Image (tube, rainbow, N blue to C red):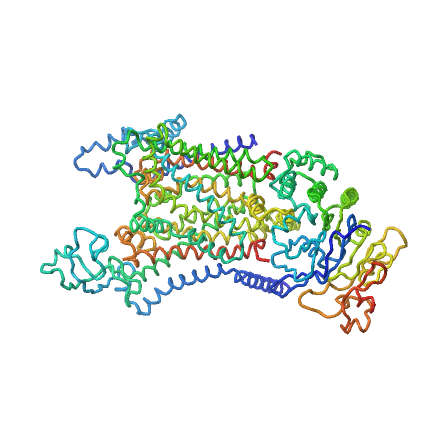
Amino acid sequence: MSKDVLVVKDLNMHYETLAGNVSAVKNVSFSVKEGESFGLVGESGCGKTSVAMSLLQLQADNAKISSGSISLDGIEMVGMSESELRKVRWDGISIVFQGAMNAWNPVVKVGEQIREAIREHYPNNTKNENTEKIESLFKMVDLDSSIMDRFPHELSGGMKQRAVIALALSCDPKVVIADEPTTALDVVIQDQILKEIKKVQELLGLSLIYISHDIAVIAEMTDQMAVMYAGSIVEIGPTDQVFSNPKHAYTRLLLESTPSVVGEKKKLRSLEGEPPSLIGEENGCSFSPRCPDPSDKCKSGNSEMGLIEVADGHFADKCCVECG
Amino acid sequence: MEENFNQDLQKELRREAIKRNWQLFKQSKLGMIGLYIVIFFLFLALLQPFLFLTGIWNKGVYDPVVGYEPIKDTLLVVECPKEYPTEKYESYQDCPAKGEVNVKKLYMAPGVEVGDMYETFIQPAPPSRRHILGTDSLGRDIFSQIMEGSQVAFILGLLSATLGVGISTILGTIAAFFGGKIDAYLMRQSDLILMLPSLPLLFIISAFAELKVWHLAVVLGVLGGLGGSVITIKSQALQVKVKPFVDSARITGGSNMKILFSHVLPNVAPLALLFMVFSVTGAIASESVLSFLGLLNIDMSWGIMIYLSQTDGFIFSGMRYWWLILPAGLAVTFLAGGFYLVGRGLDDVFNPRLRKR
Amino acid sequence: MAEYIIRRTFQMTIVFFLFLIFSYLLFNAIPGNAFSNLLLNPNLPPDAYQRVLEIYGLDKPLLERTQMYIVNFFKGDFGYSYKYFPKTPIELISERLPRTLMLFSIVNIVAFYTGFFIGKVLAWRRGSKAETWITVTSVFSYTVFYPWFALMMLWVFGYKLGWLPIGKFLYPEKWYDAPFDSDVVFTSMIKFTVVISLIQFAAYLASRGIESLSLRRNIRFGSLITIFAGSYFYWNNGDALIQKPYASDIAFHMILPVMVVTVVAFAGTALLTRTTMMEVLKEDYILTARAKGISQKRIRDRHAARTALLPVVTSFIFTIVTIIDGSVLTEQIFSWPGMGQLLLQSVLEEDIPVAMATFSFVGVFALIAHLLADVSYSYLDPRIRIKSQG
């Protein structure tokens, strides 16, 4: 049994806006084991990226982590000073951002931007050591080493995304967050990149947090997964279990709204309504307005949110399991 | 019927847009400060004719150019020492001190001795109740001059900015829209204008004819309109030109002229407006510099006030004659600064990328 | 790239040619001429005026004169000054130019660096109280009525406090028994400044490839110390030792104009840098850089400022274009006998050969600077570099 690398407990994060506080992350807890890949799925605006940003503590200036803990290898990260955080970033947790196009500084060579990260965390390396390191990283993601001396705009989208992966691996991080790494790419390249990530993860024994709105990709990529809705995790467990036996109404709907290539043809269901506004406090199950057949208890708003164990290691939101 | 409805809708939309932009502008604190400054000077500019018309101010006394009022004052006659510092005076600048007059200056008035009180008309006179900013060395009211100056500044600034931006917007859009030879010609033309050193050029022009405010406004407007701003407007128009809605207008059979006027120009307009506000700043400064160097044939302006205070040697008397030096200089600075701040506020409105959150 | 430069040079030549004709006609269109005042002198024989015109060729028709001037111009013959007769415009310019260049290159470098630095800090500390105050100050110094401000500063530092000289670029009494002209000193000062900046630049380039950040910093620091030591050595040995008191006299006279013009000039750069920096800070790659664990200062200087530099450098080069133009007013106020005064005097006195020479000098300067702006832009922004190649 491998140990937990990253443990997130009761994480709460909100944005302070003119319209009031927006709770983007509510009581989120999960843990990622060594060499395991963990998926985070949910529709746009449900707080996936906010979780990722909180892990690196790169949230916008108006975002505040109000409570909870994030510990990496047993070291608490919430409340760390900026200089301590800088050491953890990239060395402990690195990230592959959504848009690879914009992740590169247009006026600095690709190699130099990777070199810069290595230089920051391994100040005693010589120039040749760093060059070798980048070459081996490029090899791993199937890139030619000549790309080092290119400017970002000279690369294709797929190449840029591969280079971003190389960049994320450059400081031998314990955890890599992949935040919708394939969004802006076409389908063929998407597939290549996914394979690349999978290969690299298995090769290096990385812990991976894979964030996506695409539940099919999560199924393919991850061992454990969590479903997020309106800032909270509504269902969490081993990926195959969640897929075979979804407990939460939202998870079920997500699964039903995704076409399946194999198996019988069935009508796709679409999710009615929009995610709730996250401003202010609310009572009861946040999903009840969109729930296809909410129970009376659920509608009355008397139910409480909270995860209960439905199977071994498989948790789902109490109110929906009880009601729905 | 439907046309009417459409027009009403458009009007409504436009009103909405203006309202929204105004809300955005209000959020920019510095922009609002700028607007207040501009409104203050506009108020000053309009106040003067009002005061003359209603007879609150007598033209003979308060006219900025020919007004005159002797201010009586009694001064103590003293003899300035030959060597400094003495107990009373630290250096020769301090003698005669306030309320005193050097006996040597009174050789025209026989019989006056040291220690006497000497009654005289003082010019420039310090601020008093009748002249809240004092009078200049010719006994003219400074406050009235400041008001006259702000009229000049507004006329000149707005006229030359409108003219200049009008010219450069039209030329810039044409250059972007038609490209080719027309573009090349217009760009070389603005190169040519940019090559000419601006101040000496204005000297030459002022040698042809004595420049009045109107002439200067036209000259500044044309020079500004043909110069660098054509290039900037053109680059903006180029960006608009490749937007999808221009293509769709062309596909639906819009003529060149129609596309130019109903699609490209309106989208260049915000930048042009911005340019206009900023070039007011430039025009006010140019007028002041030219007046300051004595090259303009204007009766009164802020530049001329500073010019006079310098040629009369009051600048180096320091703060003793502050009312001759500070008001005009600050007025130029503040009005130019006010327009600049308004421009920055507008920039926040039109440049959504810079908006806070 | 080479093809681009050649094409631009060709266009520039045409523009310059038109510029020459236009300016020449412009000067000749001014009513009267440089010798008109001879007519006012009753003691001169009546045909004296006519004879002078003949000597200078001013009696010929305008078209013929224009043609002659252009032809001679391209032969390298700029004629003689009407006012300082035996001197040629070239002699006058080469005498005045070092003085202007010395003053304004220092002003521009100081103003650019302060402006860029302040702009960087402003964008970085957006929303703080310090930002508001610095912005207000910058706007004030950007829009302040410059001659007025300069005179006030002259009054404060030159008159009231008496720390700095009022006007002129040297104390004449110090130069009575000087073994050389002020121009000699100016020239060697300029040489000295150029060599220093080249060394500094070379040190920067050489240290760029070094991997260790601390070593890189030490090398740059070391180069600074070397420069200081070197300049101390230079000014205390050989020819420079004799020139030292004179050079320091000039330097002393430069303090006030440099200070005043810098205060006015830095603000434009600062405000522009702030705007462009703020746009850049919203970019995703700034977030990437932060995620990489790079220090705030390095993100600011290396990532944000580097990209924000582009428009700032362009506008800076355009400022350089206006050095001589802008020097007119400054030199007038500080009685600094440089190019600006020459330009102004020659225009006012209708000394056409000198005015034409200075005008065309300014024009060539402007054209080259524009070209430089485009070339340096493509160097700083690799995206454009590709475009111009392909």
Q: Give the image location of residue B291, x and y in percent.
A: 33, 50
Q: Is residue A310 above or below residue A164?
A: below
Towards the viewer: A204 or B141 = A204
* Residue beneath the point at 53% across and 43% down: C309
Residue A306's spot in the image, x, y percent?
Answer: 77, 66
Which residue appears at 61% of the width and 46% of the height? C294
Up/down of B164 relative to B45, above or below: above
Q: Nearer the viewer, residue A237 or A108?
A: A237
Residue A208 placement, left or right of B24 = right
Quadrant for residue C301, please give it.
top right
A257 w.r.t. C176: above or below: below
The residue closer to the viewer here, C181 or A84, is A84
Location of the C terminus of chain B by quadrant is bottom right
**Residue A33 shows up from this direction:** yes
Q: Is residue C119 left or right of residue C387?
A: left
Q: Position of residue C300 (x, y in %)?
A: 56, 47
